[in-house]
Image (cartoon, grey):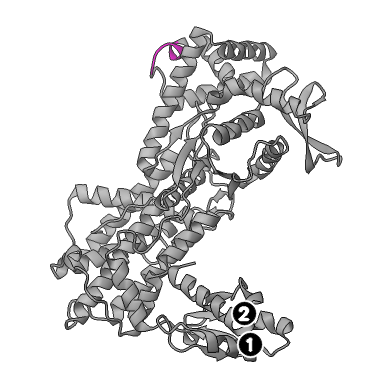
Amino acid sequence: MNATQEKLKVQLEQALVEAFGADFAGVDPILVSASNPKFGDYQANVALSLSKKLGKQPRAIAGAIVEKLDVSEICEPPEIAGPGFINLKLKTAYLEAQLNTIQADSRLGVPPAKTPKREIVDFSSPNIAKEMHVGHLRSTIIGDSIARILEFQGHDVLRLNHVGDWGTQFGMLIAYLREVYPDALTTANALDIGDLVSFYRKAKQRFDTDTAFQETARQEVVRLQAGAEDTLHAWKLLCEQSRREFQVIYELLDIKLTERGESFYNPLLSGVVEDLEKSGLLVENQGAKCVFLDGFTNREGEPLPLIVQKSDGGYNYATTDLASLRYRIQQDEAKRIIYVTDAGQGNHFAQFFQVARKAGWIPDDVELVHVPFGLVLGEDGKKFKTRSGDTVRLRDLLDEAVSHAHADLKSRLQKEERQETEEFINEVARVVGISAVKYADLSQNRTSNYIFSYDKMLDLKGNTAPYMLYVYARIHGISRKGDINFKELGNNAVLLEHETELTLAKYLLQLDEVISSVEQDLLPNRLCEYLFELSQKFNQFYDRCPILQAEEPQRTSRLVLCDLTARTLKLGLSLLGIQVLERM
């Protein structure tokens, strides 16, 4: 709820008490944004909900509320419409005063969280010895945006990369490399990441078909867990090589993460099993130690167990996730723990969250949140793959986006007969290409699948990053043309006269509400929708209102509106992890 809406809600609550007595303290006035601007800006619908309780017609109730309602500093006189809606229209003078206030505020009127918390965002999470692919795109981009918004709100955010750097796959890979490429286990960078992935695939094929090799691989896992010097050295080399490759992607995407892989929690796994045993939750089932879950059944309809220790004494993902959850609560002292993974892992999170709650590990003031997302699909509506049917490498996808942006820009420059340096073209292509990929993902409701299309995401006219980057660049074009330094405008009074100025002003003042809603529901597409609509409203204002040619004081007022729009776009896009460009 934005500051204006908050003030109106307080006034409506007071009017309810004055009209009908103390019993109505705390009754929600049901204040919402008006669906149609001709009815005003806000609408209170409480009168309809009180009709039965008060035994009166809604219009009579609305009249009694309005009689006691004092919103004269904010709104025009309230109007009652239909069966009893209270319509409120903001005063132009109030809007002007609000814009004048946020003009001097680096946060553009967005207050920080009243009670900052320690929050953990667990995202990206690639696997060592494998390349990052399109499947990592959404977790990485969505997780980063959520972390940026929480950080902007003043929360103490720990960005964790829970990489897969432990387990059977390492025994399998090390055993295979000992046979076919032993230098990779003793020498840094003996293999490039592509070769390492290829060897991993061959090791997996061998593991699946060769029982003797399976045993050799298991022995390597035992050696790794026991800290055997040669195996541990080999493991560290493999991890470091993958880590460097991941970092190339993270730098391209401007992502910052603290790596804390599965291996970090390895010493804590036995303690998890011991504590579950002490709490009476563990049941032995076919040699494995399990916790039976409420609400989960197998195909036969029998209760489903969550295995925390396998029959051979080994541990699995659930054990590691339980250990990491305890560590994050007890050592990191997190109050909200957010896991950004694909929707297909929903049951896994529901299950180990349930076990942790049953064990009494989750204090009342700690919130656990799984942030699920859908699939990235190709233009054929199927899982996004290469032409040969392989999973798309994330590096290739990003390089291709930049290449498309480069070709688009060259074509546009040719049509406009513009000459630009190669350095300018490369930088604009990089920013536009990467931004287009990020925005195409974030602008979807994360719970849905979406179709990946370079043509659509690079369109200068649709709900895309290039469209908004172009609006930002257009505003800076105004400043260049008029030789205007926006920073030197000072605290000049905004005067709202034209209809498009009023519409733009009202929208600029909704930023705090949008950011607050994303902070709570963790849906970055709401911020994307806001920025897209803001861009459209600015373009309508730009088309209908002269700016540099206007007379004073209107000219300066409109320049302030331009500046506020540019700053809002820059702030909003930065919270999505998107850079801006002053020229395109």
Q: For the magenta stretch, what is the residue range?
A: 183-188
Front-lying residue, 344 or 15: 15
Residue drawn at (51%, 84%) of the image: 69
Front-lying residue, 346 or 9: 9
Any magenta on residue 186? yes
Residue 181 placement (x, y as % from top left): 47, 13
Front-lying residue, 532 or 226: 226
Residue 61: mark in rendering:
1
Q: Mark 2 is on which residue type?
A: Val
Can residue 449 be seen here? The reply is yes
Q: In which quarter of the image is residue 295?
A: top right
Residue drawn at (31%, 69%) of the image: 101
Question: Badges 1 and 2: C-beta atoms under 8 Å apart?
Answer: yes
Residue 350, placed above or below residue 517: above
The answer to which of marks 1 and 2 sits earlier in the sequence is: 2
Residue sitting farthest toward the left: 483
Front-lying residue, 277 or 255: 277
Residue 46: mark in rendering:
2
Secondary structure under the numbered disc 2 in the rendered image = helix
Residue 584 placement (x, y as % from top left): 25, 59
Can residue 523 be seen here? The reply is no
Q: How crowded is mark 2: few (under 14 residues within 10 Å), some or many (20 or more)?
A: many
Q: Quadrant of residue 474?
A: bottom left
Q: Nearer the viewer, mark 1 or mark 2?
A: 1
Q: Mark 1 is on which residue type?
A: Ile
Residue 391 placement (x, y as % from top left): 53, 39
